[in-house]
């Protein structure tokens, strides 16, 4: 059953991503609704890695608007270029922030957030639909391993959601 995840606790982060990749594909392959798939995507990441917050923000005009997420309540709107999410959107690239306190203009939705990774979500045409935002309660919690897998997982979401 695609809705049941197998997440061995003893694996390294990279091994966990590798083990979860086919499970994510299976989970998303049975649904083509983008919002439903984004919700399960966020739940899978939070359940697998116990990050503080995992969610999506969608482009609406010149703002990012909160979408499906897992974790405590969050900022609802973020202007283009503001905070890590707005900067990733403006720069059209994944941003890894080892210490959010040192990021100029960081938007503190939660004092528990210490590091962050934000991955642009693009249509097949390259147009940015939004961003995947992940906050950790640990400083320096993200690396290029996270970036590589999360970017490939976004591609799986795009394919499954037909966007």
Image (tube, rainbow, N blue to C red):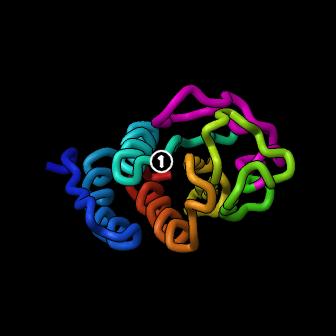
- Taking the spot 67% from the left edge, 35% from the top edge, the residue there is 111
User: Residue 79: x percent and y percent?
Assistant: 80, 38
User: Is residue 80 on the magenta stretch?
Assistant: yes
Residue designated by label 1: 51
One can see residue 37 in this view: no
Indicate whether 70 appears above or below 142: above
Q: Residue furthest right?
A: 104
Element at label 1: loop
- Taking the spot 22% from the left edge, 51% from the top edge, the residue there is 5
User: Residue 32: x percent and y percent?
Assistant: 36, 46
Would you identify the image quadrant in which residue 88 lies?
A: bottom right
One can see residue 123 in this view: yes
User: Residue 42: x percent and y percent?
Assistant: 44, 44
Number of labelled discs? Answer: 1
User: Is residue 103 on the magenta stretch?
Assistant: no
Q: Residue furthest left?
A: 1
* The residue stretch that appears in magenta: 62-87
- Taking the spot 48% from the left edge, 34% from the top edge, the residue there is 71
- Taking the spot 29% from the left edge, 68% from the top edge, the residue there is 11
User: Residue 49: x percent and y percent?
Assistant: 40, 53
Relative side of 10 to 80, left or right: left
């Amino acid at each position: 059953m695609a809705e049941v995840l197998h997440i061995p606790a003893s694996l390294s982060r990279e091994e966990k991503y590798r083990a979860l990749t086919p499970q994510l594909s299976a989970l998303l392959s049975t649904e083509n609704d983008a919002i439903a798939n984004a919700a399960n995507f966020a739940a899978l990441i939070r359940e697998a890695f116990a990050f503080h917050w995992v969610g999506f923000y969608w482009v609406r005009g010149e703002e990012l608007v909160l979408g499906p997420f897992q974790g405590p309540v969050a900022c609802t709107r973020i202007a283009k270029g503001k905070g890590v999410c707005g900067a990733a959107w403006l720069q059209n690239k994944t941003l890894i922030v080892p210490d959010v306190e040192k990021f100029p203009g960081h938007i503190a939705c939660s004092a528990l957030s210490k590091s962050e990774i934000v991955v642009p979500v693009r249509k097949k045409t390259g147009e940015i639909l939004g961003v995947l935002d992940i906050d950790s309660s640990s400083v320096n919690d993200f690396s290029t391993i996270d970036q590589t897998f999360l970017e490939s997982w976004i591609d799986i979401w795009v394919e499954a959601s037909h966007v």
